[in-house]
Image: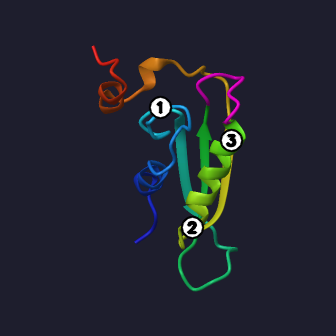
């Protein structure tokens, strides 16, 4: 069964923002995930290319390089993924309304 966007998002829930006790998916930093076949990848398994579009809470986030590296490392550990590309974007700008309701409760900011 081919890897899905939901599979990638589930894996990315293992990556936390170092300054907040919340993963990057529930924090709303992951804007888009695309998964497509990689016919050029070596190996016997069906292999997939993954492209992650994400942002940070602020443009000056000192942890951006560490978070992106954690994303690459987490997805690199999935056997079905042959290539992982992470694109950091600033438009649209991240806002706290992107935080999931569960994460809002965890952070104590739920309305």
> x, y (%) of residue 56?
61, 30
Whether the magenta-drawn stretch holds residue 61 is answered as yes
Does the CB distance between marks 1 and 2 fall below 8 Å? no
Is residue 41 rendered to the left or right of residue 48? right
On the image, numbered disc 1 is attached to which residue?
28
Which dot marks residue 87?
3
Q: Is residue 52 above or below residue 107?
A: below
- The residue range painted magenta reads 56-63
Q: CA distance from mark 3 to mark 1?
A: 15 Å
Q: CA distance from mark 1 to mark 2?
A: 23 Å
Does the CB distance between marks 3 and 2 fall below 8 Å? no
At 72% from the left edge and 23% from the top edge, which residue is drawn?
60
Q: Secondary structure at mark 3?
A: strand
> x, y (%) of residue 49?
62, 61
Where is residue 38, by image quadrant? bottom right
Q: Quadrant of the C terminus?
A: top left
> x, y (%) of residue 98?
44, 24
Q: Is residue 24 above or below residue 84?
A: above
At 70% from the left edge and 74% from the top edge, which residue is drawn?
40
């Amino acid at each position: 069964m081919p890897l899905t966007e939901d599979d990638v998002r589930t894996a990315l829930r293992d990556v936390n923002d170092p300054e907040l006790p919340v993963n990057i998916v529930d924090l709303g930093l992951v804007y888009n995930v695309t998964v497509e076949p990689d016919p050029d990848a070596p190996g016997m398994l069906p292999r997939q290319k993954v492209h992650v579009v994400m942002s940070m809470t602020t443009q000056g986030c000192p942890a951006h390089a560490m978070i992106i590296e954690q994303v690459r490392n987490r997805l690199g550990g999935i056997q079905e993924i042959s290539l992982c590309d992470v694109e950091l974007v600033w438009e649209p700008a991240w806002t706290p309304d992107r935080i999931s309701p569960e994460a809002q409760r965890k952070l104590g900011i739920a309305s």
